[in-house]
Image (cartoon, helix red, strand yellow):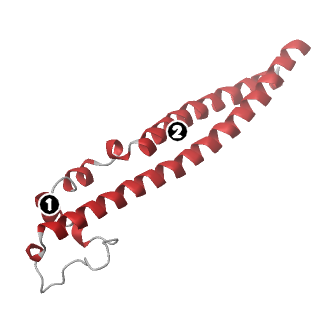
Amino acid sequence: MFTRIYSLAVCFATMMIIAVSGGIALYDVVQATNPMLTMNSWEYQNLQNNTVFRRSGMMVAPGLPAGLAAPTTEQSFDEYTDEELTHMREARLERVIADHRRNAIRSLIQASIFLIIASLMFVIHWRLAKAADRDG
């Protein structure tokens, strides 16, 4: 009797883990395939045009292309040409998209590991519960 209750309790717990991990994995697939859809609104809005990008402060973030370093205190953001600013904004957008995609893949791997382990635990304990039913 105890074995059956224990096994079914583990099955219930693993089903909760499978449900949560499955939801996370599905979101990660969406994020990896369309990172701009899942990107936070602040980043997305500030990378849409040069005017907003200039005001956002994202220009001073690391990862700017060589030769297009962020302005020093003596320089003004207004000293950049539209072409330089567009190049900086597009480079930043590419980096943000790559980071989102990488994070999604990393999270998908974690969720997959949880799914595999929880599924194995479920199968083992489901069989144990069925065996306890037969033994009666």
Q: Secondary structure at mark 1?
A: helix
Residue located 87% across and 19% down the image: 131
Q: Percent from the top left, x then y, of residue 48?
A: 19, 52
Which numbered circle lies on residue 14?
Answer: none
Which numbered circle lies on residue 25?
Answer: 2
**Which is more foreground, mark 1 or mark 2?**
1
Residue located 88% across and 13% down the image: 134
Question: Within the image, what quadrant is residue 119 found in?
Answer: top right
* Rendered view: 13 above or below 45: above
**Rendered-image quadrant of the N terminus:** top right
Q: Percent from the top left, x then y, of residue 34?
A: 38, 42
- Would residue 114 appear left or right of 29 to someone viewing this image? right
- Most foreground residue, 68 or 101: 68
* Rendered view: 11 above or below 67: above
Q: What whole-number distance in Å separates the C-alpha atoms at marks 1 and 2?
A: 35 Å
Residue located 36% across and 61% down the image: 95
Given the current orientation, which residue lies at the most extreme bottom position?
A: 74
Residue located 8% across and 73% down the image: 78
- Would residue 59 appear left or right of 79 to someone viewing this image? right
Q: Is residue 136 visible?
A: no
Question: Within the image, what quadrant is residue 61 found in?
Answer: bottom left
Q: Percent from the top left, x then y, of residue 36?
A: 32, 46
Dot 2, how many residues are within 10 Å of its Cα: few (below 14), some (14-19), or many (20+)? many
Q: Which residue is mark 1?
A: 50
**Number of residue marks:** 2
Q: Is residue 129 visible?
A: yes
- Would residue 19 appear left or right of 10 to someone viewing this image? left
Say which amino acid is labelled 1: Asn
* Rendered view: 42 above or below 6: below
Dot 1, how many residues are within 10 Å of its Cα: few (below 14), some (14-19), or many (20+)? some
- Please tell me which of labels 1 and 2 falls first in the chain: 2
